[in-house]
Amino acid sequence: MTRLALDLGWQGGQVVRYVLPAHEDKGTYEIIHSIAMYPEAAVPDVIGYSERAARSDPGFTYTDFAVNGIGNNARAFSGIAAVQPVQKPVSNPIIAGPDTEETTAGIKTNFSEIIFSRGKTFEVIKITGPSPDTAMLIDLSRKAYAKIP
C-alpha cells in the first residue's frame, strides 16, 4: 500500500477487474472496481487525491458528467485520449546507430470513472475501452452504492 494511503488511514480494501466485449465497437471494455475503507473524516481527502490522480495525464481531454443517487461527494468524468507520437531510441544500435530515433505512437485508451463514498467506504469504478459505456458505469455505481452498509 502507498505511503499516502497509509497516512490517510487506509484500513483495507480490494480491487476486482473484469474484461468484456465492447457493445458497438471492436475490442473490449475493462472495468476496474476498487473498494477501500478509511476513517470517515479522511474520505473527502481521499476522494480529492483520487480525482486529481485520475485527471493528471495531459494526454486526455476530461469532461464531467452528471450522476445522481450515489451520495453528495461523487465525482464522475470521462477522459478522451489523444494519440501522441513518442520518440524512443531504436532497440538495436549496431544496425541503426546509437543516435537514431524512431517515432512510435503512444496509444491511450478512453475511459469513464465514478468516485463515490458512504461513511468509511470509498469506491472507484472505472471503465476503459474504445467508447466506454457510461450508462452501464452509472448503473454499476448505483448498484454498488446501494450495497454499502
Image (tube, rainbow, N blue to C red):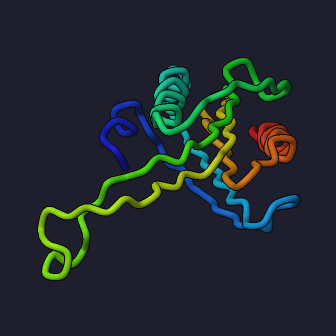
Q: Quadrant of the C terminus?
A: top right
| Residue at (36, 39) in percent of width and height | 6
Residue 8: percent from left, percent from top = 40, 30
Furthest residue toward bottom: 95
| Residue at (69, 41) in percent of width and height | 112
Side (left or right) of 139 relative to 77: right
| Residue at (55, 27) in percent of width and height | 47
Side (left or right) of 123 relative to 142: left
Side (left or right) of 95 relative to 103: left
Residue 18: percent from left, percent from top = 69, 64
Numbered label tally: 0
Side (left or right) of 146 relative to 72: right
- State the residue in front, 43 or 108: 108
Residue 86: percent from left, percent from top = 37, 52
Q: Quadrant of residue 122?
A: top right
Residue 80: percent from left, percent from top = 64, 39
